[in-house]
Image (cartoon, coloured by chain):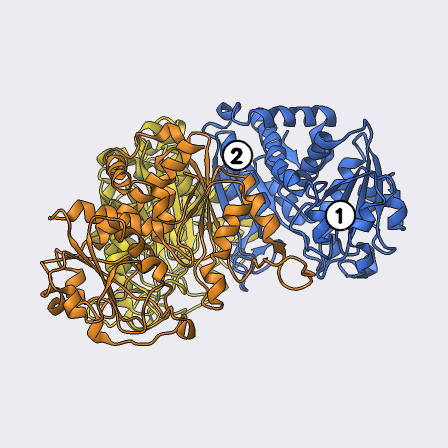
Chain colours: A blue, B orange, C yellow
Amino acid sequence: MRTYTNVKDLGNLNEAVKEALEIKKNRYAYKHLGENKTLLMVFFNSSLRTRLSTQKAGMNLGMNTIVLDINQGAWKLETERGVIMDGDKTEHLLEAIPVMGCYCDIIGVRAFAQFENKQDDCEEKILNQFIKYSGKPVFSMEAATGHPLQAFADLITIEEYKKTQRPKVVLTWAPHPKALPQAVPNSFADFMNEADVDFVITHPEGYELDPKFVRGAKVEYDQDKALAGADFVYAKNWAAFADSNYGKILSKDRSWTVSTEKMALTNNAYFMHCLPVRRNMIVTDEVIESPQSIVIQEAANREISAQTVIKRILESL
Amino acid sequence: MRTYTNVKDLGNLNEAVKEALEIKKNRYAYKHLGENKTLLMVFFNSSLRTRLSTQKAGMNLGMNTIVLDINQGAWKLETERGVIMDGDKTEHLLEAIPVMGCYCDIIGVRAFAQFENKQDDCEEKILNQFIKYSGKPVFSMEAATGHPLQAFADLITIEEYKKTQRPKVVLTWAPHPKALPQAVPNSFADFMNEADVDFVITHPEGYELDPKFVRGAKVEYDQDKALAGADFVYAKNWAAFADSNYGKILSKDRSWTVSTEKMALTNNAYFMHCLPVRRNMIVTDEVIESPQSIVIQEAANREISAQTVIKRILESL
Amino acid sequence: MRTYTNVKDLGNLNEAVKEALEIKKNRYAYKHLGENKTLLMVFFNSSLRTRLSTQKAGMNLGMNTIVLDINQGAWKLETERGVIMDGDKTEHLLEAIPVMGCYCDIIGVRAFAQFENKQDDCEEKILNQFIKYSGKPVFSMEAATGHPLQAFADLITIEEYKKTQRPKVVLTWAPHPKALPQAVPNSFADFMNEADVDFVITHPEGYELDPKFVRGAKVEYDQDKALAGADFVYAKNWAAFADSNYGKILSKDRSWTVSTEKMALTNNAYFMHCLPVRRNMIVTDEVIESPQSIVIQEAANREISAQTVIKRILESL
């Protein structure tokens, strides 16, 4: 594997999940792979889970790990050719990225959607420049349009908890006070569409996700109908994607909050969320603290999804 | 050992000091203990000595170490249940803490007193939530009411430098321009009360420490009388603890500064301070630069106290 | 080697370059040297290349590495004796530096020129206090008047790319929107004066560098004449050094920008720069993207120069 940005990069998904579960049983069995190899983690945005779990994954594999926090305000990269750089941008990405590539063997990059220019976000400008110019294998630690380490961890978690061969999995929009990127729901849809599940997406009208990720998934605007019989409820907020409303909040309707009443409509479903989560906006205290909540187990699997991806990249070096 | 927050956690204090001195002689002898184990250091406040010495201690033991700086302003944790999280707090501690616990084997936490709510400080809200919810052994890297790694290092240093079986140890308040927590003097009293020393506390009236830590120690309001015949002078500023004045500065009286004249009252005492120290407020240049000043040796022992604590926790895993 | 601040510290320069090229062929061959040794990297200023390359170099040598970012605004060191520290400076360097020395075996320090007081900059106050008070070997990761890890990497790069026994190397000033220290051109001159090259410096009048570093080098105020027949063009901006103009910008004349026309005057020279570089101020897009540009290879050699220096220090412990 040379890059990891979406579900396709994993190849056969069943085999990837199987490999992940093997790694989870014995996460120090592959330390020889990372010997004398360096993982560089580049953060353009803040991070808790991704930072810790990916660093842990690299160390499990015996790698040296370097974390580079790029304070977006302080270190501005020029991205256009031909510019006379007499302003506040001190370095051009065409130098900065290959230089970072010099000092490591694998690069993880986190660069969120900016919600300033939809085309820039959709083109994954920063991530793709790392892929193109770093000279090293690159994996996404959440980019503008996807968060594939999260979605892979989600799939592993569903595999561990599912009680039927083909569970019903519902991705439901929920309210939030700030405009959030679509990266997590995009990647979740990207993965669920390839997995052996009955996948349904529910959200208020106007919150349609990029068709590139939704593909053939069923979209149901009535949350109650969507939740009926669900085995897994995956809650997440996102801002609107449609052109004229790109990055805008259209609703903060708390009737979409996942509550005990909503969960009662399901087949005693497990509750999932990528975290961090706003309690009593996205989900009630009662639901997230219930035995059916598997958000911590899901977070713990971030170490496993990251380790599986990094292991595969190491094997391909 | 599952937690380390006070002197009692060390059990027999003589044996703990003996073990520390053994470790100091050969600090790489226990690297097998930390193999494939991860130390997570969580800082809610800034740090120099604690950060470096604890990280070094973990690495001496062969551990992987991860440092997580939580900028208090940027990453606000909600602590109350039932709150609708539509404000500036993006994550609830009930998720954040168990998640951090997922990615490590041992957690060190630094969370100072806020001086906003005495009860919150005294209850050690943040530290205790880590102990309760992380699922992993937790040790204090300075909390609201104690700094037990510092006090353990202090005791090791006294053991190394004492010339009599039962030295006289004087903890003296000294002036400082800002309101400082009582964590260091509390833990120093906590340890000295259990050690084989003649322990005296001196401070201006109104600066009485929490009786929970002072216990049976002698309190002498006349600094000169307290210093008479001392073998060790331990200087430290702290703000008032008494309810109505909690967190306030009652005095900046520089006649309490530890000077050559003050040291002349002692039995050629060693001078100690946890650092950082304000020169010519807490202590004069002359005293801190004298051969009797052992502040650097004391700081060096922070690595040893941390390593002893982490070693014991590793042995209990 | 106990300190590394200038070319003299390397001793025989040919042997140093030879050793560096050996290390480059097999950079993991010396891991035993750094076992149970800790590298502390102290940054008073921000860093990309130096941070990554030096950390990588330490890890290549099997060391534990600790990075300490000292936010200059937040952590003010008092430097004068006798001061009553009742202001905003919380610690005196006379304590802070030996304490840092306690927790490591080797210290790297980055502390730029402040352009506030020429004498302070020229005396290398911060770097020299680390050398004097830390008790450990110290190397410069760019100080006020020199950047010897950069210059050593530059020399290695020239050695790798030179086509004649004694190439002509031209250091040319180029325009920049902000006032930059002289550290890089100083060290480059310091090294080139000792290397087997034909060394020429060119800059507008008024930009004369410190004679301590220029020594016998030829200074040519006409850039075109200087560039004639050059085998290597090393571009860099710096602010004025002369007393009355110390730290000032005297010119932003873009006729000094290294362009294709300028490069046409040379002997098909390689283009070098320490990075970060302002495109179309220092150098045109066309030149820096040309096959003759070796700025990335030069940056990659920062890992090698750092590793050679740290290896030598480890061997001397």
| Closest to the observer, C313 or B224 | B224
Q: Which residue is mark 1?
A: A235
**Quadrant that contains the N terminus of chain A:** top right
What is the secondary structure assignment of the residue under circle 2? helix
Q: Residue at x 15, y 64 (%)?
A: B227
Q: Is residue A314 above or below residue A275?
A: above
Three-letter residue code for mark 1: Ala
Q: Let me know if marks 1 and 2 both belong to one chain.
A: yes
Q: Which residue is mark 2?
A: A58
| Closest to the observer, B23 or B122 | B122
Q: Position of residue B92 (x, y in %)?
A: 62, 54
Q: Is residue A301 above or below residue A13?
A: below
**How far apart in space, not on screen, are marks 1 and 2 (Cα)?**
29 Å
Q: Is residue B261 left or right of residue A221?
A: left
Q: Is residue B118 above or below residue A139?
A: below
Chain for disc number 2: A
Q: Position of residue B217 (x, y in %)?
A: 25, 59
Q: Could you tell which of marks 1 and 2 lies nearer the N-terminus?
A: 2
Three-letter residue code for mark 2: Gly
| Closest to the observer, B72 or C49 | B72
The residue most toward the front is B216
Mark 1 crowdedness (10 Å alpha carbons): few <14, some 14-19, many ≥20: many
**Quadrant that contains the C terminus of chain A:** top right
What is the secondary structure assignment of the residue under circle 1? strand
Q: Is residue B127 left or right of residue A284?
A: left
Q: Residue at x 27, y 54 (%)?
A: C97
Chain for disc number 1: A
Number of marks drawn: 2
Q: Residue at x 11, y 48 (%)?
A: B163
Instruction: Look at the image and tell me whether residue C53 can be seen.
Output: yes
Of the two numbered discs 1 and 2 in the rendering, the one whose residue sits closer to the viewer:
1
Query: What label does residue A160 carry, if any?
Result: none
